[in-house]
Image (tube, rainbow, N blue to C red):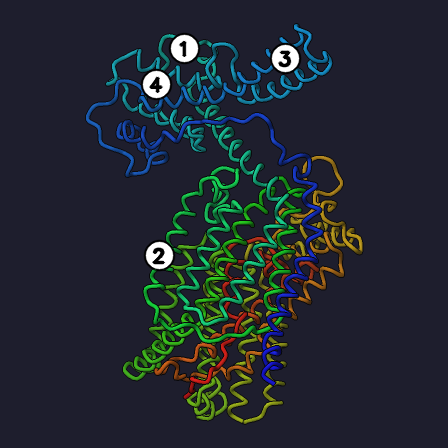
């Protein structure tokens, strides 16, 4: 019997491991097909052979310190930060040395590739004269080098011979030098200061140079300025210099990204498989008796090493490229953020090791055998789509997979750390909410129910207004914070409404008054979310929140009726009827008043008349779904840009977020896309199916280790249920939008679509639902 029980206890973990391996094996051939298209459509990731290296560091901060005080306030305020401007008694009498040195370095950087090409051509011509090698091959090699050099020279307007760097930059620098040599420095100090600041900004590739140069007071040219430069004028020379320098800096950045994308397309399968298996090891480690702090520090250290080995870009760098390894060569120097994260991990592990008697986590078990394997499959599908879109889709989205590499790494880091921290986090949340509830009860007793409610409403509205104004341009952040508010608020409501006090509340007074008293906290949570979404104009998340709120409100009314009457069947019927009515009313309201918002109005117009609307996205999506073969086009063969030549007139550019279901249809076919959607819904349900066997979801205390603590699992189970309900609504809305049933405004496919905040938030909440606490023999409940 003990042997059988041991085997039965190990069976879920064994099945979980086998399913993870099966998910990796299922998607592995698709990752292998990506290795053959590492250069991308139209060779978008190919090495251009010519780019500018060794450009000087930004010079504008240093020039602002020496010339900012004398410049025009409009120019100074736009180009210089307040801390960079130092007061100066006398205007400088010459160009700053840092500026002249940077101009010389920039000229050398631009001319270096041309000089290398000229040297190569000279070497090949020498071989021709000496008869070394085949003449035809040497002639072709010379023509190839010259054909590569000519566009580079023409693009950056490089002079040959003794000319120094791009012609506009040389013109602007010579103009300013002649202006300083023509008259004493105290003549027209503002004009010279403006010119110096704008020249430094142009050297840095600043985007505001052109409008500022057209409006600012600039110095007149002195002796020695060429007629061509005089004809061009200083404002035009500054504007062209800024454009050329910005293009050169961006070209160098893109060259680094191209190299990283080629490597990623070759190794993405190995990275994904290794990361998922490593996450599985950490997941199984979190279920043992490990100190939470030590486990979290271990997870941070492991994923920091993964970032260095995989050369993961820092996910908070935006569209910039800051890899974890400075050079592409293996075992090269780590980036600064790797040292910081490694130091934090080491400090956390040492702090945990100095407390050997700290409480370890309780034993845990998987909530579902398919919990972690489902996440593996979803993230693999998402990365495959983004890799294919990056290689073959819209040119503007060619680095999506590279950014997603950092997002997925951050999501796995968040998942792994929260797996170890879930129990202390749950106890802390339960304690905080209990204290908040007690403070609210005392405030109600002291000031009266209506006064306390009014103060709470006013304070919340003020917070929502400040929140909306501060984050109005960060909708991806506000929508995820709104989701988190609704999840925690709904979990808190159902957690507390299962107590005996709530049962007495449900039976006190008439039905209408009793129901209102019972449900009002959830109404408050929903109202705050709707207000926040309206302030930030997050219409897509608002629609999801409205649908999910209907599910929560219907469940709360059903719970109230069950506690009041003791009946189960009628309570279930009430929940079904109320939720159905809520869906109908919400959808009807969307079509009636959705035109208030400009984005929603455009989507509604596109939904009503896709071929006649100014927004043709749904027409393109519908065409793409109808044109896709039954089994899909396959990796590398999807016509993301359509069949017309020039540009990319195929699917919408945001197919990586709004129309992920359509992307699944295009790559894998209709059956596979529907299997992914339905499978995601089944997977989410399986995550919470067994939580009711472990906890009743009621507030209670548990005696553990000789002291009474909050039951962590009860509140976490409600958080998992609320998250699953909200995610199911999100899944339903995005599929309905792709099928032209509902308008879409930024609704993503969970775990598959592109988006850092959505992925990381879902990963963190998944970590709270993957494991369940198991009671031990030394625990008592009260």
Look at the image and tell me in which quarter the C terminus lies.
Answer: bottom left
Residue 290 horizontal/vertical position (percent): 44, 69
Q: Earlier in the sequence, mark 2 or mark 1?
A: 1
Asked if residue 548 lies left or right of residue 706, the reply is: right
Q: Residues under labels 4 and 3: Cα distance?
A: 48 Å
What residue would you read off at disc 4?
219
The correct choice, above or below, for 197 with respect to 487 in the image is above
Q: Residue at x 36, y 35 (%)?
A: 78
Q: Residues under labels 4 and 2: Cα distance?
A: 57 Å
Q: Are marks 2 and 3 in contact (CB under 8 Å)?
A: no
Q: Residues under labels 2 and 3: Cα distance?
A: 58 Å
Q: Earlier in the sequence, mark 1 or mark 4?
A: 4
* Mark 4 Cα shell of 10 Å, populated few (<14), some (14-19), many (≥20): many
Q: Which mark is residue 347?
A: 2
Of marks 4 and 3, the one in the foreground:
3
Secondary structure under tag 3 reads helix
Q: Earlier in the sequence, mark 4 or mark 3?
A: 3
Q: Residues under labels 3 and 1: Cα distance?
A: 38 Å
């Amino acid at each position: 019997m003990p042997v059988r029980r041991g085997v039965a206890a190990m069976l879920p973990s064994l099945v979980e491991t086998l399913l993870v391996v099966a998910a990796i094996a299922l998607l592995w051939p698709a990752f292998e097909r990506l290795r053959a298209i590492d250069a991308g459509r139209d060779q978008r990731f190919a090495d251009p052979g010519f780019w500018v290296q060794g450009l000087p560091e930004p010079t504008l901060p240093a020039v602002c310190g020496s010339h900012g005080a004398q410049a025009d306030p409009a120019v100074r305020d736009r180009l210089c930060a307040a801390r960079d401007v130092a007061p100066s008694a006398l205007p400088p009498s010459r160009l700053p040395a840092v500026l002249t040195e940077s101009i010389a370095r920039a000229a050398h950087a631009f001319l270096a590739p041309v000089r290398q090409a000229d040297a190569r051509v000279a070497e090949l011509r020498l071989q021709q004269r000496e008869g070394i090698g085949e003449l035809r091959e040497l002639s072709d090699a010379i023509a190839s080098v010259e054909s590569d050099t000519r566009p580079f020279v023409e693009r950056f307007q490089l002079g040959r011979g003794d000319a120094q760097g791009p012609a506009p930059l040389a013109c602007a620098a010579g103009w300013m030098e002649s202006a300083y040599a023509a008259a004493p420095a105290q003549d027209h100090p503002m004009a010279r200061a403006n010119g110096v600041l704008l020249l430094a900004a142009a050297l840095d590739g600043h985007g505001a140079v052109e409008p500022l140069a057209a409006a600012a007071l600039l110095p007149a040219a002195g002796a020695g300025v060429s007629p061509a430069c005089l004809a061009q004028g200083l404002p035009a020379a500054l504007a062209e210099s800024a454009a050329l320098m910005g293009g050169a800096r961006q070209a160098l950045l893109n060259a680094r990204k191209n190299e990283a994308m080629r490597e990623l397309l070759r190794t993405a399968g190995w990275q994904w498989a290794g990361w998922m298996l490593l996450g599985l090891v950490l997941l199984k480690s979190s279920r043992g008796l490990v100190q939470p702090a030590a486990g979290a520090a271990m997870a941070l250290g492991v994923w920091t090493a993964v970032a260095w080995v995989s050369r993961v870009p820092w996910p908070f760098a935006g569209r910039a490229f800051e890899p974890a390894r400075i050079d592409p060569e293996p075992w090269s120097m780590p980036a600064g953020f790797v040292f910081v994260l490694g130091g934090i991990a080491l400090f956390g592990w040492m702090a945990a090791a100095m407390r050997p008697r700290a409480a370890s986590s309780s034993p845990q078990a998987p909530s579902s055998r398919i919990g972690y394997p489902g996440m593996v499959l979803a993230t693999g599908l998402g990365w495959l789509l983004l890799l294919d879109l990056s290689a073959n889709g819209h040119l503007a989205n060619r680095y999506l997979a590279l950014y997603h590499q950092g997002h997925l790494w951050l999501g796995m880091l968040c998942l792994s750390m929260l797996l170890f921290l879930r129990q202390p986090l749950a106890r802390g949340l339960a304690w905080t909410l209990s204290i908040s509830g007690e403070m609210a009860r005392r405030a109600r007793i002291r000031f009266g129910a209506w006064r306390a409610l009014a103060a709470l409403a006013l304070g919340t509205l003020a917070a929502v207004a400040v929140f909306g104004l501060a984050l109005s341009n960060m909708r991806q952040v506000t929508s995820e914070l709104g989701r988190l508010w609704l999840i925690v608020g709904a979990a808190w409501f159902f957690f507390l409404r299962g107590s005996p006090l709530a049962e007495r509340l449900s039976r006190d007074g008439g039905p209408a008054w009793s129901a209102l008293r019972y449900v009002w906290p959830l109404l408050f949570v929903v109202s705050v979310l709707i207000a926040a979404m309206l302030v930030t104009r997050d219409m897509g998340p608002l629609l999801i929140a409205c649908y999910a709120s209907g599910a929560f409100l219907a469940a709360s009314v059903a719970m109230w009726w069950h506690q009041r009457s003791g009946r189960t069947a009628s309570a279930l019927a009430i929940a079904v009827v109320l939720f159905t009515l809520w869906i109908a009313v919400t959808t009807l309201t969307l079509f009636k008043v959705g035109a208030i918002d400009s984005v929603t109005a455009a989507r509604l117009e596109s939904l009503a008349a896709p071929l006649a609307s100014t927004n043709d996205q749904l027409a393109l999506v519908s065409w793409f779904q109808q044109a896709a073969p039954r089994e899909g086009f396959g990796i590398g063969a999807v016509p993301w840009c359509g069949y017309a030549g020039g540009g990319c007139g195929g699917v919408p550019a945001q197919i990586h977020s709004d129309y992920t279901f359509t992307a699944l249809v295009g790559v894998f076919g209709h059956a596979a896309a529907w299997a992914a959607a339905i499978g995601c819904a089944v997977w989410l349900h399986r995550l919470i199916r067994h939580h009711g066997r472990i906890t009743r979801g009621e507030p209670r205390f548990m005696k553990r280790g000789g002291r009474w603590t909050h039951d962590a699992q009860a509140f976490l189970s409600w958080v998992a249920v609320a998250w699953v309900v909200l995610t199911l609504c999100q899944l339903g809305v995005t599929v309905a939008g792709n099928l032209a049933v509902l308008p879409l405004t930024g609704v993503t496919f969970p775990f598959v679509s592109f988006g850092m905040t959505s992925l990381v938030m879902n990963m963190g909440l998944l970590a709270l639902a993957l494991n369940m606490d198991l009671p031990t023999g030394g625990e008592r409940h009260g």
